[in-house]
Amino acid sequence: MSNLAICLVICALTMVSYIIGKLPMGLTALLSMLAFVLTGCLDPGAALGYFGNANGIMMVSMFVVVAGFNRTQFVKKCASSVNKISRGSLTMVMVGYILITVLLSQFIQSSVVVFGIMAPMMIASCEELHISPSKTLFPLAMCGISTISVLPLGSGATQFAELNGYLEANEYTAFTVALTDPMKARLPMLIMLALYCIFLAPKFAPDAPVVKTGTVESRQDNRAALPAFQERAGYTIFILTTLALIFQVQLGIPTWVICFAGALAMVLFGVLTEKEAITAVNLPMALLFVGSLAMGGALAQTGAGEVVGGVLASVAMKINNPYIIGFIFFIVPFLLTQIMMNRTVMIIFIPIAILACKSMGANPIGIMILVQSACLSSFMTPMATPAVPMCMAAGGYSLGSLMKQSILPASLLCIVSVAWIMTVFPMF
C-alpha cells in the first residue's frame, strides 16, 4: 500500500473517531499524528515542529489574555452597555457584535485573535440576558473566520498583489487582478454571512453546551474583585494587545509574539495567578490543533493535494459550463481546507486553477478568487483553523453540533460565491 493510501486511511479513521467521540479529541489527534510518523507519511522533525507552531502559540496565549480580561470588571461593564443599547434584544446584540467582528477582521488577519477579542464580551452579554453563550459563539467565530480581508483595508489591501504574483509565477499575465477585485468578488458573501449570523445562526445553535466548556469562561462573580492596580492593568494589557495586533504590520512584530507578551503581562502584573493562567490554557484543544497540523502536513507530504488538484484540472477542462467549473474549484478546496492548512491548499490549487484556465484561454481571475474565498472560509471542523477549537472550548460544542450548525451556511456560502463571482468575472 502506498503512503498516499495509508495517509487517507489514517485520516478516515481519525475522522470516524472524532465523530464517534469515544476517545477525547486531543488524544485522537495525537494518536493519528503518531500513526502518520510511524507509517512514514509524516517526517518526525515536522511533527515535532507542530508543537511550536506560531498559530498554536498564538491560540494558547490568547486563552490567557482573554482569561485576564475576563478577570476584570471592565468586560462586564462593556457587555452591560451593549445590552442597554440593544434593550435586551438578542438580535440587536448580535448586530453589534457581528458588525464589530467584521470590522476587526479587516485589520487583524487572524480569526483566533478576533474571536479572542470579541468572545469575552459576548459571553458576558449573554449571561446578563440569561442566554446560553452556546447560542452565539459559533456564529461569532464563523463570521470572524469567513470575512477576513474582504475589504481593501489592512491585510485585504495586499490580496490583489498576492494573486498577481501567482499569475506572474505561472506566466499568464494577459489578465491582472485589480485592488478592488477581491472585495468586488467577496462582498456579497460577507453581507450574506453577516445577515445569516445575526438572524438565523442562533436559531440553529444548541440551547446549552453539549460538552463541558473550558476556555473563554465568563468572570466568576464569586471571586473577589481585583485590586485597583490589577483591575486597570487587566484591561490596559488587553487594549494594548488588541491595538498592537491591529497595527502589527506597521510594528513589524509577529502576531504570536504580541499575544505571548500579552499573556505574560497578565501574570507579571498580577491580573492572573500562575495557576489561573495555566488553567486558562485548554490543553485538549491545543493538542487537537497540533494533531490537525499533522494531518494537513501528512496530506501535503504524501501528495494528496496535488493528486486531487490534478484530477480537478482534468475534469474542469472537459466541462464547458463556467458555473460548474466554478463550483468544482470552490467546493473541493473548501472541503480540503477543513483538514489542511488554508495556505497549503491555496498554494496547491490557485496555480492549478491558473494552468487550467490558461489551457482553455479563459479568464482566471474569478476562479482564483473562488479558490481563495473557499480556503479562507474553513469553519466546519476543529482541524480547519485554530479559531474553531477555541470556539468549541468556549461554547461547549461537540463535533456533531459543530457540523449541524455548519452545513447550511456552508451551502449558502458556496451558492452565493459561485453564482456571483462567475457572473461578475466570466471565464469567457
Image: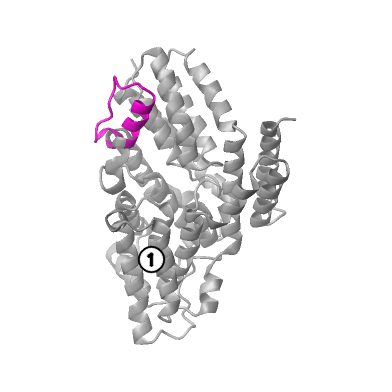
Residue 170 x, y percent position in the rendering: 39, 24
Magenta highlight on residue 167? yes
**Label 1 sits on residue:** 121
Tell me residue 402's x, y (percent).
55, 49
| Position in image of residue 334 (x %, y %) | 49, 36
**156 or 126, nearer to the observer:** 156
Query: Which residue in the rendered view is the most extreme toward the front?
Result: 45
| 111 drawn magenta | no
Q: Residue at x 35, y 66 (%)?
A: 241
Which residue is at 29% across, 36% downward? 161
- Residue at position x 33%, y 44% in the image: 149
How many C-alpha atoms fall within 10 Å of the one at disc 1: few (<14), some, or many (≥20)?
A: many
Three-letter code for the amino acid on which mark 1 is drawn: Met
Q: Is residue 96 left or right of residue 266?
A: left
Q: Is residue 398 visible?
A: no
Residue at x-position 49% and y-position 33%: 333
Instruction: Indicate the quadrant containing the N terminus: top left, top right, bottom left or bottom right.
Output: top right
Q: Position of residue 289 (x, y in %)?
A: 56, 53
**Magenta segment boundaries in residue numbering:** 162-183
Depth check, front residue: 248 or 11: 248
| Residue situated furthest right in the rendering | 1
